[in-house]
Image (cartoon, coloured by chain):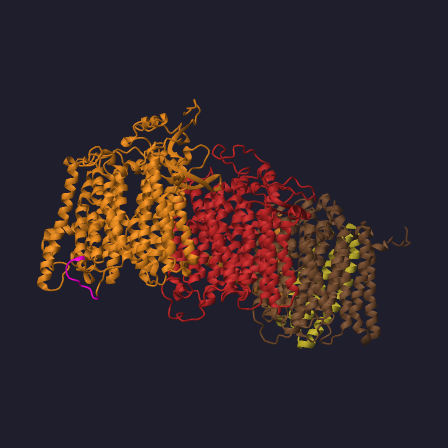
Chain colours: A orange, B yellow, C brown, D red
Amino acid sequence: MIELLAATTSSLTSIPLGITQEGNWFLQNAWLIPLIPALSFVGILFFGKRLPRGGSELGIAALLAVFLLSICTGFAWMDHRDNFHGEEISQTIINGEHGEHGEHGEHGEHGEHGEHGEHGEHGEPSLAVVNTATWFVTGGVEFSVGTLVDGPAVMMLFVVTLVSLLVHIYSTDYVAGDRRFTHFFAFLSLFSASMLLLVISENTLQLLVSWELVGLCSFALIGHWWEEKDNSNAALKAFLTNRVGDMGLLIGVTILFFASGEMIPDSFGSFSIATTNTLASSGLLSHSTLLIAACCLMAAVMSKSGQFFLHTWLPDAMAGPTPVSALIHAATMVVAGVFMIARLYGVFFEGFSIGGSSINLMALVGGFTTLVGACLAFVQRDIKKVLAYSTISQLGYMVMALGVGAWTAAMFHLFTHAFFKACLFLGSGSVAHSVHSFDMKSDMGGLRKVMPQTYRTFIIGSIALAGLPPFAGFWSKDEILVGTGGWGIMGGTNGNGSYTFMLVMGMITAALTAAYMTRCVYLTFFGEFRGHGNPHESGPRITIPLWILAVLAVFAGFLNLPKGFQLVPESLQERFGHYVEPVAGYFPKISHATPSWSLAIISTIIVVAGISLAWNYYFVKVEKASKESGQSLTELPDGLTTRLTIARMGHTLLVNKYYLDHLYTGIITRAVKEPIAELTYRSNQEILDRTVDTVGRTAVRVGQLNYHKIDQKIVDGFVNASGRISSDSGEELRKIQSGKVQSYAAILFAAATILAGLLIVIV
Amino acid sequence: MLLNQFLILSAVLFSIGVYGVVTRRNGVMVLMSIELILNSVNINLVAFAAFREAIPGEVFALFVIAVAAAEVGVGLAMVLLLYRNRRNIDLARIDSMKG
Amino acid sequence: MILAFERPAIDWHAVAPEIVLLSVGVLITLLDILFLEKARPYMAALSGLGILATAIPLLTLGIDGTERVLFDGAYVVDNFSLVLKAIFLLAGYVVILLSTNYIVDGDYWESEYYGLLLASLMGMIMMASSRDLISIFVALELLSIPAYLMVAWRKRDPKSNEAGLKYYLMGVFASAVMLYGMSLLFGVSGTTVLSEIADSIEAGNGSSSVMTLGIVFVIAGFAFKVSAVPFHTWAPDVYEGAPTPVTAFLSVASKAAGFVALLALIFVGFYELSNIWEPLIWILAALSMTVGNLVALRQTNVVRLMAYSGVAQTGFMIAPLAVAGHSLTTGDQALSAIITYLAIYAAMNLGAFAVIITLARRTGSAEIDSFAGAFHFAPGLTVAMTIFLFSLAGIPPLGGWFAKFEVFRVLATSGEAWGYLLAVVAAINSVIALFYYANIARKMWAEEPSENDLKNVEITPSLVSALAICVLVTLLFGIFPQLVARFTEVSLLAFAT
Amino acid sequence: MDNLLDSWGLTVATFSPLVGALVMFLIPKEKEYEHKIIALVTSLWVAFVGFMLLIWFDLDATEKLQYVVDKSWIDAIHSRYVVGLDGISLPLLLLTVLIVPLCIVYSWNHFPDPKNPKTFLILILVLETGMIGTFVAQDMVLFFVFFEVVLLPMFFMIAVWGGPNRKYASLKFFLYTLFGSALMLVSFLSLFFLTGAESFVFSEIADNVVAHTVSRTAQLWIFGGMFLGFGIKVPMFPFHTWLPDAHTEAPTVGSVILAAVLLKLGTYGFVRIAIPLLPDAAVEWAPWIGLLAVIGIIYGAFCCLAQTDMKRLIAFSSVAHMGFVMLGISTLTDFGINAAIMGMVAHGLITGMLFFLAGSMKERYHTLEIKRLGGLLVQAPKMGWILGFCAMASLGLPGLAGFWGEFPAILSAYNPANGLPVETFRTFMVIAALGTVLAAGYLLWLLQRSAFGTPKEEFAEDPNIYDTTKTEWIAWAPLLALILAIGIYPNLVFRATDAAVDASLTPCLTIDADKSTHEEIESAHCSEVYGLSDHGPDDHTASKG
């Protein structure tokens, strides 16, 4: 099948890419899915005002159609995954001088023999369906656009369309009566279109294009009420931080383009994801270029998915309407970064050499973000800010999972997280809708009696988020912890590497998550109602999506029951992993940790401990204190952290991470004087935010300096100066014209004699 | 051998004439100095013509004399005009146009 | 010893133009004496017709095309001299058109003016053909003396008076210096005919310092005539003082005459001694361009500005001479470049002066500020003036650019280092020049007129025809340069070798 | 029809605006309506001719010069009237032919203050002739003449109809560009004389440069002259100071034409003359051009951040954009130069639109002080969103034309032609990528301060802030549609330029054969590539297809 050309210097071989062009109708033209919402965007933009329901019905119809389409694509993919034996496409490459990496050598041969024997335990190969068309040709390089439908793509299609549909329905009630109702729906469908385009994009260029379109829509939607200055500020900040990340993406894509160019004969390079991944995972691209490319792409992920030091825009993005926060800043857009890592996993796996090492940049960033997000979520007054920081923390979880090689666990967590986080956000939206404020401490409390539906869905969502069994959160978080390679009795053996440090961080965050969710539930739904006015339950168009999401939050977990789970027949285990994880040339060979009972139990115990600790503090002590003082308190006046020095020290230690980071940004913080709770919050907002603003302002000042000093004075000055010199010298020369005829005669004669003298002497 | 003396004489005359033109303030004096210069040229021409037995030199001198006459006529008319307008013929004073 | 005086064989056809012009001049003077007041109105028309009449023999000589040499080499009628005679006549005709009703106001005696003008023209035409020291000197004086009188034309106006006297004194002094040079030249070479001087130089006695002194003094004399720096000091005062048509005449015709003499001397006379006159001309060219332009920047009076612009343009015209000695071909190219520049410069400058005269009649002053807002009360004139100014500056598609282009071409291809240097100096100067030309144009276009009576300027038919000729010539040479290029393919060198 | 167009097409396109101007010249000043009609009809006629040229253009032989007319013009100086159209100049010609009618429509009933529509429209038509001429000229002297012709009308437009400080700005613009073109002329001349070619036609000179190799130092000096000449026009970093003044003072239509087309003359000069004719010097100069381009990007961005006047900000933003175009050119790969031409077209459309908007806002607010603006979206929503759309296009949002100008330029900077220092170009790439972030910064900051927020009390109830009028819609709709169309399907431009650029680079610039797709790089005689058979003294050769 592969003719190994004899001894030519650049011998041409071909490597299987794990993609095919046949596949049933749905898989073939998945490009319809992004097209329909795009058309609806145009429709709403032009005819929205004249439609009876202000364009929202056009949006919902489009999303419904697309949701059905993606379900069909899902089923088509499942069938394709199980029984497809069509012909596989391979890419001819120059392999002479690069030489095979040591331990990957045998994998190479295996590939070549084409019978893909023991491709990991997931059975025979899953071939992604690719359908490309040439977009344009410039400078001998052919840019193509197309769709690549495989496991993760189908999963994401399902999640995005579902959540987007629910958010559409939800916002018909939430945003009703807004001045720019049509405008809102137009941008919602544009957002869905670009997100869907991103999900099924076949090459990195298309990924880049949709990546920035998604950024644009988030800019427009966050700044929906752009009358207030801080809304437009938040939108601007979101877009600029994304742009910073995009710079990384731009450079990463360029490096990958040209790196793959060296390998493919007579072409400058190729953008296609399948080729780049296959080349990377079969060790044909040099490790250093992959490392640089991975770091650049990592920058993009950190800005888009709100990882540690580029996350400041996400909490501010809560200024946008809540359905936007639910859709964009919980379920879809922020996950784009994680999806990009999953999509280009070959590059990251090789770049950060995830298999076999105990620490790498991605895992570290992920772990650190989970911890930081969790701590910050603790001290928020605004309910949406709590959920925003919890999103940051969960995203950190996913990135950490990818960092440790637990690919399926990360994708599964993404899948479940989308549901319960959207449910929580929409729940908080419905609460805020009735209370007309987001501030838990001053305007909420005791809403369980008044808003039963929202209360119950919120409870389900927070339990799922905390990760108590049998809810979805438990299964996905447990998978990740197992994936980190376990530690002693915790099991989770033969993972990709012994990431014990990540395991510890994961455990602590699980506890913290449980704690702050309990605090949030108590402050909003228990105790007495602190706000004014009379809150009431929201209408059906809000509660029904809440219930759908709550149900999904409960049952989504069963999709990926771990291997050894005897309660259920073998065929039902690991369904999610089986269908979603690609087994093909373009996916690296990752090893799957064996699930262990002991780890599951310990993690549940930790979560329960977290809940009980918070429960005891709030439901017992604060309840008693508020009964004694008669007004509903939100925290004990002389709380644990203020009394006990050790607790205060522990807390400041957590905060100190900031100082580490703080020192890293180089600006010394103000002296610590408010109670610890205020300090943590203000330290995050003030310092990090201000660094971003000061960077902006210094740029402006440098601009001013540059403009006034250099541009006007020196460069422009030089031009005017030359003008002035010529006119001044003109003035002097004018003086010799004295008007006296005899001086003229003298000049004439003097000149004649001098010239004569000169010429006689010299010539 | 004789030629150099003539050349020196004409050079001397020439320089005196030039000095006269440049320094004298009286219009008529300047005209006279110009005549001096022209005559020095004549001497030069005649001397060379004689030395080289070349007739054109003589003819040239004649032409110079004739033209000099015409020039002086015009020059005196100009100076007269100046006197009628300004009541003096001091060349240093006529500098209304300058720069 | 043959004493009988046998009549030298004169080729009447060759001297026909001179004769016709002489007779017209004499006729006018006679008419003036006989009919006094009655003849006044016809004087201008008659002299115009006279000039056109002299043009006829020129055409026949042109068609005939043979080179005629009279008085054994002293007086030559070849296509070089024919082209230049045509330029002189055309310029003379336009000057007459300019001065028809300019001279009338101020009730000076009009007819004499035309007599003097024709006499001066006669001198110029003679200069074009003269190839020997004596005839050059006589032609020079013949064209200068009437010019002195024309400059002092307005007897009662102190300025005209002062200008006249200055021009006279400087003119005579310069020609005296030139004469001294000529005498030395004669002394060394023994003959007055330029071709024979060239032979004697070739024969080897050209290297003496006396010869250098002679050459320098002769070139200095003519440098005065073409107002090259440092001999230009007379030009601004005389231009300002003299009546404007006379200034136009001086700036174009007498300058051209100066050039003709210079070309004849250098190309026919001492072409071999290029190591003497090339550096001299180089210095003159560089100085005139730079000084002319720089001082022009500061001028407020448009006539003085035209004087300095004239000085700068002279710098451009001399420039090719600075590399002419490099080789025979460069010599020819330099000659044709200079003549092209002369022809186009004549048209541009006369046109500009025509506009200045018309506007001065209305605004009464020659200050540049009085030109402000001309667009509003004299749009036609403004457009014409813009064409002339930008043509002087060398902007395509107007004539000036082709003239400058030829000069640049000669400098660039001369292959000598300081040829390139001069080209760079010329490039910088053309940018500086553009500044004051554009300044006037902008003042005319963009500013508000000072007083607000917007009545249009009444333009006499003769001025209109003068303007038309100049605009036509400038545009024609700009768009179809090969017209002028074909005419100026003349060469003096063929004669010299 | 085909051969009529073939022989007369380009000459008609170039000179019919002049005819229109002459006709208008004869009509007295008062009849303003007739003037407007004639101007519009002439420009539409030229647009129609341009469109016909596009239709009959043989798209799969874009590298060959088509509609070639080759007559002798000035024999004395061996310059010939040679005009031709190939892939590189087609898009730019169409851009010109599109922009001018839109400008005439835009200024239909609001001419700038010294109301003189007759002369204003005549100047626009003369400008159009100059611009079209420059893009079709294939002879150096012809190119130089048209290059100068463009200068004069622009000078008068700024000088007569400009803002308060117009005297200084117009003269500076005129002198600066003239100085540049003087140097350019000197380099043209010396190239002509050194190679001893017998005519000024580009292909002729390109052959001779290849034939008897002009010494390297001479090539360097000549390229230096051209670099200065074109660099000033682009404008490149140190020579850009004329642009902001010219733009702030120029009337709206003036700065639209200046931004949309005149800036392209410089870059077009590089692509058409400098690089194909002097390949070795180009390789020598490329890193420096790259350096200046990148500095331009960052320097322009910083200056934008410091601006208080909107129009001046847009002017500096075009300095930054042209930086990207020059970066594309400096890579000397056909990938980079394609990006540069796309960048030119995109910048023309987008910045043209931005200046239209700035003009309309100046009409409404009578000031462009960003501090006093605000709440445009509240008072004039449609105009606000168009400003948003253009800001997004300008910062290079993918899916709009701007992106396809910047991204391929950055991509090509990663892998410049051989002989160029790869590391330096990769650092240029990173800096350029940083430039895109700064671009996003200043554009969105402008958008936020002028469009978002609530209108200042000074203009809160001002009736003068009306939304886009009909004439503005007619003028702007084609531009907006094109920006979106090129954004979604960039092949509209690349289809034409790809082969032409490849041809203009390959024969004269040695690209290592094995990498590039054209194995058979025979040392093609340049004139074949340019599709010009050796022209007899005066015969007219129609070498189509």
Magenta span: chief secondary structure: loop
Viewer-closest of A565 and A679: A565
* Residue C136 placement: quadrant: bottom right
**Viewer-side residue, C460 vs C84:** C460
Report the quarter where the C terminus of chain C lies.
Answer: top right
Is residue A392 visible to the viewer in this orientation of the structure?
no
Instruction: Using residue D360 as the reference point, say whether residue A166 is left or right of it.
Output: left
- Quarter of the image holding residue C404? bottom right
Q: Is residue C158 left or right of residue D473?
A: right
Image coords of residue A373 (percent x, y): 23, 50
From the top left corner, tell me how far across and down residue D528 is, in percent: 61, 38
Residue A531: say if magenta. Answer: yes
Magenta-tinted stretch:
A525-533
* Residue plotted at (70% across, 43% down): D537
User: Where A506 sits versus B36, above or below?
Assistant: above
Q: Nearer the viewer, residue A729 or D392?
A: D392
